[in-house]
Image (cartoon, coloured by chain):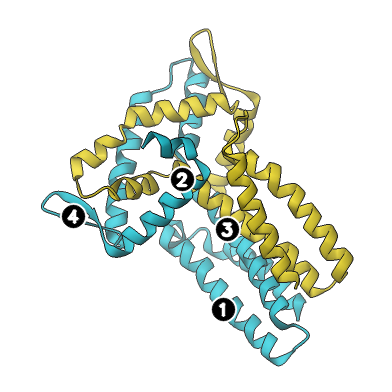
């Protein structure tokens, strides 16, 4: 019962996210999911704890919903921004020349697309014709510099 | 029994922090993925065994254990992968460096990273058997076709504007 409830809540969150993506509003895809996913998660938590108490099925339902939501967010952000995912989708239309596939995703366009996105999301701003970091961007840069060091990645 | 599962995840993380993260092998995507995938498989098997031996643990216990591991592994791998080579993060780093040195960001170098990324990705897709090269042309394998259809359906779901532009 608890597991079915979590699965139903997740299915409803995905359905509402799909609908939210079809409505005009100034929110990116992740925020649109959070807008529907968080209230549903809170409702599921309240219902599960009320109905099942502090039991294994109650916590299992909450954690299952959280895990499925994280997996869904990972999948749709991957599909929207990953180079590999875009190439696979393009190849559905039929075989292409290796050079043509590489040129479909023009590197300078990729940079421009991401710069626009970073400006839109407030990580970078343009001031006096120059690109500069916002405070939000600086924080993110600092966090990922530390993470790169933590994971032992070679910095570029 | 639940305590065993709750202790597993911090233990798995501590082993990585204290022993594995300095190893060059654990800087490869494949190794870090297998480190988590292997742990999840063992975790799932132990949880299933517990469910068989203790009816109170049951299916809910297995779901709880696997969800916990799923949240941990997904979060870890996303951060690991973003820190390794997130393109947007590389752009932010480039803007930060340029700002510190009072110059414009080197967008040509960033475009070169993008071009290298594309070549890496085609080679990686070929290595895992999702695409194949025949006479200079790239096509999807059967497995690649299935995955591409799933990705396309998901993109249509979350980006209906993109679909109408196709």
Number of the label disc, if any, that sits on residue B133:
4
Compare marks 3 and 4 and give the one earlier in the sequence. 3
Q: Secondary structure at mark 1?
A: helix
Quickly name the residue at label 1: B42
Q: Are marks 3 and 4 in contact (CB under 8 Å)?
A: no
Quickly name the residue at label 2: B156
Among the chains pictured, the one given cyan colouring is: B
The quadrant in which residue A51 appears is bottom right
Q: Secondary structure at mark 2?
A: helix
Q: Residues within 10 Å of mark 1 (few under 14, many from 20)?
A: few
Residue B62 x, y percent position in the rendering: 67, 77
Among the chains pictured, the one given yellow colouring is: A
Query: In the rendered view, does B150 fall on the left or right side of A145?
Result: left
Q: Secondary structure at mark 4?
A: strand
Q: Residue at x 32, y 58 (%)?
A: B145
Report whether residue A152 is seen.
Answer: no
Closer to the eye: label 4 or 1: 4
Q: Residues within 10 Å of mark 4 (few under 14, many from 20)?
A: some
- Looking at the rendering, in which quadrant would you find the N terminus of chain A? bottom right
Q: Residues within 10 Å of mark 3 (few under 14, many from 20)?
A: some
Q: Is A62 situated above or below A134?
A: below
Number of the label disc, if any, that sits on residue B74:
3
User: What is the spatial separation of the Cα atoms under label 4 and label 1, in whole angstroms?
Assistant: 37 Å
């Amino acid at each position: 019962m608890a597991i079915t409830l979590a699965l139903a809540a997740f299915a409803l969150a995905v359905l509402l996210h799909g609908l939210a993506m079809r409505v005009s509003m100034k929110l990116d895809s992740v925020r649109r999911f959070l807008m529907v996913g968080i209230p549903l998660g809170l409702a599921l938590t309240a219902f599960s704890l009320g109905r099942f108490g502090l039991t294994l099925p109650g916590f299992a339902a909450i954690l299952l919903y959280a895990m499925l939501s994280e997996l869904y967010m990972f999948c749709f952000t991957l599909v929207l921004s990953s180079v590999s995912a875009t190439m696979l989708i393009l190849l559905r239309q039929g075989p292409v020349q290796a050079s043509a596939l590489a040129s479909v995703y023009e590197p300078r366009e990729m940079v421009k697309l991401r710069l626009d996105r970073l400006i839109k999301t407030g990580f970078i701003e343009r001031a006096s014709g120059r690109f500069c970091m916002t405070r939000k961007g600086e924080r993110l840069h600092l966090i990922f510099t530390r993470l790169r060091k933590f994971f032992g990645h070679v910095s570029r | 029994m639940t305590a065993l599962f709750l202790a597993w995840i911090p233990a798995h993380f501590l082993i990585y922090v204290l022993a594995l993260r300095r190893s060059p092998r654990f800087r490869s995507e494949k190794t870090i993925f297998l480190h988590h995938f292997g742990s999840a498989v063992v975790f799932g098997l132990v949880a299933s065994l517990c469910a068989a031996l203790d009816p109170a643990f049951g299916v809910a216990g297995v779901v709880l254990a696997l969800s916990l591991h799923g949240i941990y592994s997904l979060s870890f791998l996303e951060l690991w992968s973003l820190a390794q080579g997130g393109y947007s993060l590389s752009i932010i780093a480039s803007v930060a460096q340029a700002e510190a040195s009072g110059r414009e960001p080197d967008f040509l170098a960033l475009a070169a990273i993008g071009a290298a990324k594309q070549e890496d990705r085609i080679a990686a897709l070929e290595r895992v058997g999702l695409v194949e090269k025949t006479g200079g042309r790239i096509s999807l394998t059967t497995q690649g076709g299935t995955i591409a259809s799933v990705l396309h359906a998901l993109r249509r779901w979350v980006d209906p504007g993109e679909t109408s532009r196709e």
